[in-house]
Amino acid sequence: MKDTMRIGTLVGGGDAIRVIPQIVGHGFESFSLTFWQTTGETDLVETGKRVQELAAEHDFVISTVGIFGNPLTNTGENSDVIASWERLIDHAHLFGTDMVSGFTGRLPGVSIDESIPKYTEVFGELSKRAADRGLRIAFENCSMGGDWESGDWNIAHNPLSWEKMFNAVPADNIGLEWEPCHQMVQLIDPIPQLRKWTDKIFHVHGKDATIAWDIVKEYGIHGPNPYVWHRTPGFGDTNWTDIISILRQAGYKGTIDIEGWHDPVYRDELEMMGQVHALNYLKQCRGGSFVPNPL
């Protein structure tokens, strides 16, 4: 598998030992483990050991371990986010991964510009901690309902904010956990963006979108009618053959992990049906299975 871009899916970190054995047989080749706001009561040492045993048995890899919360406030429900970043950085090697992912956070109710100093303070330290352990940090490009002027979770959702972030903390081990969906929601064309930013894309989420251009043209994006839907790959507007080709041409060595549980059609009892379709679709888009050249 070392010569093939692995295709996998996201699994809750606390549920990994329970869930992975149930779904790995569908052909998932990698798993991105995620935690929401805290690693909580999860024993990272024991979980890492069990996950690595499963990986050896089923030939998959752990692409990332991630914590999704707001480390720039680090109060209330987010009071354990920085500590969780530190825990995952310290324990990532036990999962066999060199990457920790999540949101940058932001200062609630103020602009991205006003959040940059706090981001610099927090991730200046976390990036050094990660670098000391040979790890990379990847920020998901989700707006979480925010915009340039205000939001509650993440500043890493616009290419202008990426420039500000990477200038503020010019560390080689800080990059993006990118997907086309979160850009399409902003009516940004993901393909030229991908070409421009490949050197900073460390991990790719397999999530797409469908844009209802007829609604955009008639009602705009601020009316009562939805104009865009998050989709599982294979059901959205994006040509993933193009995405994989661009990534390969740029030398991308990471995985694509499907971010499920968002599709408005393939959901509930159809969730895994949609995810397995996406898995097979993405494998086809990468060119199928690896075939060695003749000696």
Image (cartoon, helix red, strand yellow):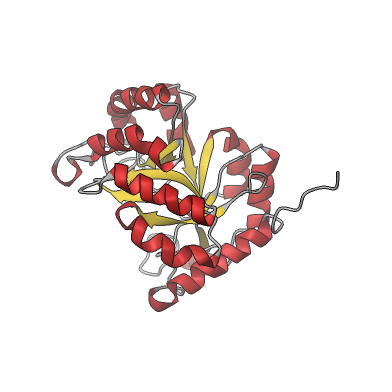
The x, y position of residue 138, in whole percent, is 44, 38
Residue plotted at (20% across, 43% down): 78
The x, y position of residue 249, in whole percent, is 70, 40
Query: In the picture shown, does residue 215 fall above or below 11?
Result: below
Residue plotted at (40% across, 78% down): 269
Q: In this view, does 16 lie to the left or right of 213?
A: left
Query: In the picture shown, does residue 99 fall above or below 230?
Result: above
The residue closer to the viewer here, 18 or 100, is 18
Residue at the farthest left position: 76
Residue at the farthest right position: 295
Q: In this view, does 142 lie to the left or right of 37?
A: right
The residue closer to the viewer here, 242 or 58, is 58
Query: In the picture shown, does residue 171 fall above or below 3?
Result: above
Q: Is residue 145 left or right of residue 294?
A: left
- Give the total number of marks visible in the rendering: 0
The x, y position of residue 41, in whole percent, is 20, 48
Answer whether residue 205 is visible to the viewer in this image.
Answer: no
The x, y position of residue 164, in whole percent, is 42, 28
Answer whether residue 244 is visible to the viewer in this image.
Answer: yes
Query: In the picture shown, does residue 42 fall above or below 266?
Result: above
Residue plotted at (21% across, 47% down): 40
Residue plotted at (43% across, 50% down): 53
Quarter-wise, where is residue 93 in the image? top left
The residue closer to the viewer here, 88 or 37, is 88
Query: For the C terminus, which image quadrant?
Result: top right
